[in-house]
């Protein structure tokens, strides 16, 4: 029923999405949406936390917000939106450079020929070049630190090893901007780097999958994830949580019909097929927040399943 | 001594009108250039500035920026001056080729410079490996910050210095040689003093560029934070209001050197 | 003490000169523009390499075409060069300019400056100097080096005539006081004669004649030299060519014997306080002469005059370029 172009003038779906979703949004989801809805579409991808801050400050006015993780979305409640729909997750992996000095061992770990605990021992060795993103502005950066701490608890990694993994006293030398991390790994100037599974798939990078208990991608392990804490340099305390993809329609961006249409599109089977292909872990769509506040079109779609 | 009035041909209402139009045009451009600064000052309250600057570690990025830029400037001066002089004197074979080489980093977006630097001096490259023997890493370090700043600003110095050296007539240097000077003494006592006003303005521009370098820094030198990176991160962490004071700090710290250089240069030029 | 016998190839012709200058001698090279005068001085000063031959100063080889790498560098040859552009350093005062050479001392510099009349200008910058003053400073500056031979490349030609001659005299006295030899290059005969003991005539890179300043004018060896030293009138007598100098003719009665030239006045114009009279004979233009005494003749009148000892050329010497 909603397959053809919408009635009246085309509106703009103005999306703000997490940095790692850029390729997905621009190349794989955007064009089919435009074709299907006849609306205009525009996407801006950057660190989810930073985007949320800018929306709160009024510097950014998208009508669709798709962060990774609940924390950025929580910043916008209740003033900018009261609901969100969770539809996929983006588990953490460790991507590695296939021609580096440690590549052989990393490959064995990724194939299961060596225990996953060896990964952490390897990352702690002197001279191992690991890269990750900035925890103060990026959920992936936060997630990676929390992942290492969870590994202490659930994989028996020693505290000393965990500390060495994160660079010890010189931790900041491991921290790269999101723009810089992938090119540096791809150019072979890092041995391994934090990544989302979809990121590794889209970039064609070999990776080591992490156990569900520590990869922040499995909704059934949410309780475990919540046990990880991190205190940022700003003093803010961040709790570990599922790295899920949530979407919501924001009033400040105007054109609510187009915004809702895009979120609906995200939940369609066509979009979900694309998500799987690009490496995302599908989750059954779940409404978070105040369900009564969500548009009827969305709630209907969810309850139909 | 009275100044004679302008010749009749240069007076008259037609000339007055066009001079007036030129002035108005210049004023509009000047105000437009200052626009961002005016916006900055309009959005800042002294309270916001103080609270941002009182954060722990707020002064570290300033020190990092200044230190890295001074080092970058020193390296650029040392390595760029001979190149600029040879360019000005036309003593390089295939001069156009050399000029293109100097202009290329200027034409390359700083972000791209950063990406290419990974391939050039990253830890696993031949150059990077050689550097590591000297205990230097060109990735995410102070050293990397200096390199990024150098690449973003060196063309400004070389081109400006070459123009400055070109204003020194070769006859001056020839006269000095005829008087028995050795090359180095002529350089020190004639060439550099005569080129100094132009060199000063070239340095001023280079300094400003180095202090504000961002694109290449974002890629290869995220840490340690200089002021531009601090602004960027603070913007994402806590928003515009807390990031702007650092922008003001950047201006206040970066400005004195270029202003001083321009004033001195104008004064020195008048004496020649 | 200067023994130069060399060639420098140029685009249009080769400058090939063999000349010797004795200690303390002042030599002038006379020649029109483009004759190669500047190239000659530049070779002596070491600014251009030789394509043949060599230059020696006091038996020390300064330049040699055979081994250019062994040429003594500019500034250490004992040769000074004064050019039309004084080349003063604009950022230094007059005194600092004069003291610029590596071994200059302020005491000696000030004495030289005083002899040149510059003592009141020592703290001035070159910007505030007149052309003549600037050249005096340049001379002082050059003299602070160990100059055995001073080369002057028409340094005063941009100044007016009286000043130019005055400065030349100043230079001449200074040089004679020091016993320094000099090579002056000029296109004005008057300057050459005022300055030098010996004058050489240069034309398209070659020296045509060298000799006493007065003798050069009275006895030019070829018609070409005659044309370069001021002969303006030419008279063909069969195979021979007679050169007539405007300053060496006198009016005379008709038919007073041999050596009398008859012509007709075809033009007149003032030249300073004198009158220049243009004369034609047998349809041929004889030239312009100075009418020295009494009322000038009217147009079309017949004239007889006698030239004093006019040089006569035959054969190849009679070629006028």
Image (cartoon, coloured by chain):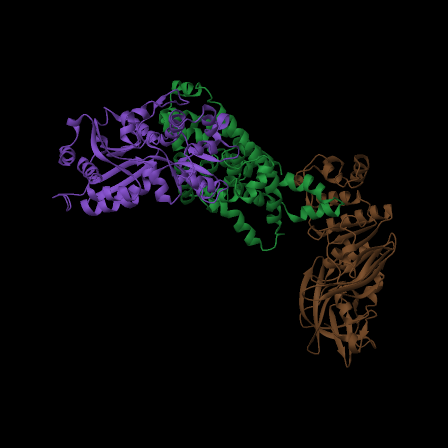
Chain colours: A purple, B green, C brown
Horizontally, is B112 left or right of C141 in the view?
A: left
Q: Residue at x 73, y 74 (%)?
A: C263
Which of C218/C22 is in front? C22
Give the percent coordinates (x, y) of residue B115.
46, 43
Q: In the picture, which quadrant includes the N terminus of chain C?
A: bottom right
Image quarter of the C terminus of chain C: bottom right
**x and y percentages locating residue B17 in the rendered image:** 39, 42
**Which of the 4 image quarters holds residue A297?**
top left
Can see residue C153?
A: yes
Seen from this angle, which residue lies furthest left?
A1
Report which quarter residue C16 is drawn in. Answer: bottom right
| Quarter where residue B11 is shown | top left
Q: Nearer the viewer, residue B249 or A77?
A: A77
- Up-down: is B63 above or below C79? above
Residue farthest front in this picture: A113
Q: Residue furthest bottom?
A: C238
Residue B266 in view: no
């Amino acid at each position: 029923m909603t397959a053809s172009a919408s009635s009246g003038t085309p509106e703009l779906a103005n999306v703000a999405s997490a940095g790692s979703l850029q390729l997905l949004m621009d190349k794989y989801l955007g064009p089919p949406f435009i074709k299907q809805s006849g609306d205009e579409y525009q996407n801006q991808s950057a660190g989810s936390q930073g985007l949320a801050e800018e929306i709160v400050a009024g510097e950014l006015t998208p009508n669709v917000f798709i962060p990774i993780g609940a924390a950025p979305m929580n910043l916008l409640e209740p003033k900018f939106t009261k609901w969100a729909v969770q539809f996929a997750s983006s588990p953490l992996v460790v991507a590695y450079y296939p021609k580096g000095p440690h590549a052989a061992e990393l490959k064995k770990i990724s194939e299961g020929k060596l225990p996953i605990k060896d990964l952490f021992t390897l990352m702690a060795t002197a001279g191992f070049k690991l890269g990750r993103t900035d925890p103060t502005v990026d959920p992936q950066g936060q997630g990676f630190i929390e992942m290492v701490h969870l590994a202490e608890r659930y994989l028996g990694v020693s505290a000393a090893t965990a500390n060495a993994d994160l660079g010890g006293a010189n931790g900041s030398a491991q921290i790269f901007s999101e723009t810089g991390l992938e090119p540096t790994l791809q150019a072979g100037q890092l041995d391994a780097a934090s990544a989302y599974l979809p990121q590794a798939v889209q970039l064609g990078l070999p990776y080591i999958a992490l156990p569900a208990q520590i990869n922040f991608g499995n909704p059934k392990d949410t309780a475990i994830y919540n046990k990880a804490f991190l205190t940022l340099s700003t003093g803010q305390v961040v709790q570990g949580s599922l790295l899920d993809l949530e979407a919501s329609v924001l009033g400040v961006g105007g054109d609510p019909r187009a915004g809702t249409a895009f979120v609906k599109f995200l939940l369609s089977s066509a979009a979900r097929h694309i998500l799987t292909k690009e490496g995302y872990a599908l989750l059954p769509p779940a409404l978070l927040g105040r369900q009564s506040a969500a548009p009827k079109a969305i709630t209907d779609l969810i309850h139909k399943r | 001594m009275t100044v004679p009035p302008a010749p009749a041909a240069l007076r008259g209402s037609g000339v007055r009108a066009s001079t007036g139009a030129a002035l108005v045009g210049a004023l509009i451009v000047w105000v437009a250039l200052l626009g961002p600064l005016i916006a900055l000052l309009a959005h800042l309250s002294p309270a916001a500035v103080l609270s941002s600057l009182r954060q722990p570690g707020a002064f570290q990025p300033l020190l990092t920026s200044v230190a890295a830029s001074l080092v970058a400037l020193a390296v650029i001066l040392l390595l760029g001056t001979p190149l600029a002089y040879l360019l000005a004197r036309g003593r390089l074979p295939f001069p156009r080729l050399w000029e293109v080489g100097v202009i290329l980093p200027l034409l390359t977006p700083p972000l791209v410079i950063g990406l290419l630097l990974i391939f050039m001096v990253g830890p696993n490259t031949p150059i990077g490996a050689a550097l590591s023997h000297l205990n230097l890493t060109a990735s995410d370090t102070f050293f990397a910050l200096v390199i990024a700043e150098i690449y973003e600003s060196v063309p400004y110095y070389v081109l400006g210095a070459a123009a400055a050296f070109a204003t020194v007539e070769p006859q001056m240097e020839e006269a000095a040689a005829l008087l028995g000077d050795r090359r180095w003494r002529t350089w020190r006592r004639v060439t550099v003093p005569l080129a100094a006003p132009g060199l000063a303005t070239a340095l001023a521009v280079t300094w400003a560029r180095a202090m504000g370098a961002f694109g290449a820094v974002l890629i290869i030198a995220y840490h340690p934070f200089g002021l531009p990176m601090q602004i960027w991160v603070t913007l994402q962490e806590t928003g515009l209001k807390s990031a702007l004071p650092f922008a003001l700090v950047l201006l206040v710290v970066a400005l004195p050197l270029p202003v001083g250089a321009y004033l001195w240069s104008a004064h020195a030029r008048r004496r020649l | 003490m200067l023994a130069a016998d060399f060639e420098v190839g140029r685009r249009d012709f080769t400058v090939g000169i063999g000349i010797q200058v004795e200690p303390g001698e002042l030599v002038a090279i006379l020649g029109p523009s483009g004759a190669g005068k500047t190239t000659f001085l530049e070779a002596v000063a070491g600014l251009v390499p030789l394509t043949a031959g060599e230059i020696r100063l006091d038996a020390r080889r300064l330049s040699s075409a055979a081994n250019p790498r062994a040429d003594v560098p500019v500034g250490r040859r004992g040769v000074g060069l004064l050019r039309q552009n004084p080349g003063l350093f604009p950022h230094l005062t007059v005194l600092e300019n004069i003291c610029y050479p590596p071994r200059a001392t302020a005491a000696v510099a000030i004495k030289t400056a005083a002899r040149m009349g510059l003592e009141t200008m020592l703290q001035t910058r070159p910007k505030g100097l007149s052309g003549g003053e600037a050249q005096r400073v340049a001379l002082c500056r050059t003299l602070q080096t160990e100059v055995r031979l001073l080369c002057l490349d028409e340094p005063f030609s941009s100044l007016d005539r009286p000043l130019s001659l005055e400065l030349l005299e100043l230079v001449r006295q200074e040089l004679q006081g020091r016993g320094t030899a000099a090579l002056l290059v000029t296109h004005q005969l008057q300057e050459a004669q005022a300055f030098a003991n010996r004058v050489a005539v240069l034309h398209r890179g070659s020296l045509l004649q060298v000799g006493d300043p007065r003798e050069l004018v009275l006895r030019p060896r070829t018609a070409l030299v005659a044309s370069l030293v001021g002969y303006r009138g030419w008279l063909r007598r069969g195979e021979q060519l007679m050169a007539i100098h405007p300053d060496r003719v006198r009016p005379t009665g008709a038919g007073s014997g041999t050596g009398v030239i008859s012509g007709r006045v075809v033009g007149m114009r003032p030249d300073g306080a004198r009158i220049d009279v243009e004369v034609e004979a047998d349809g041929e233009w004889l030239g312009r002469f100075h009418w020295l005494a009494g009322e000038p003749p009217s147009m079309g009148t017949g004239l007889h005059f006698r030239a004093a000892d006019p040089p006569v050329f035959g054969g190849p010497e009679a070629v006028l370029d």
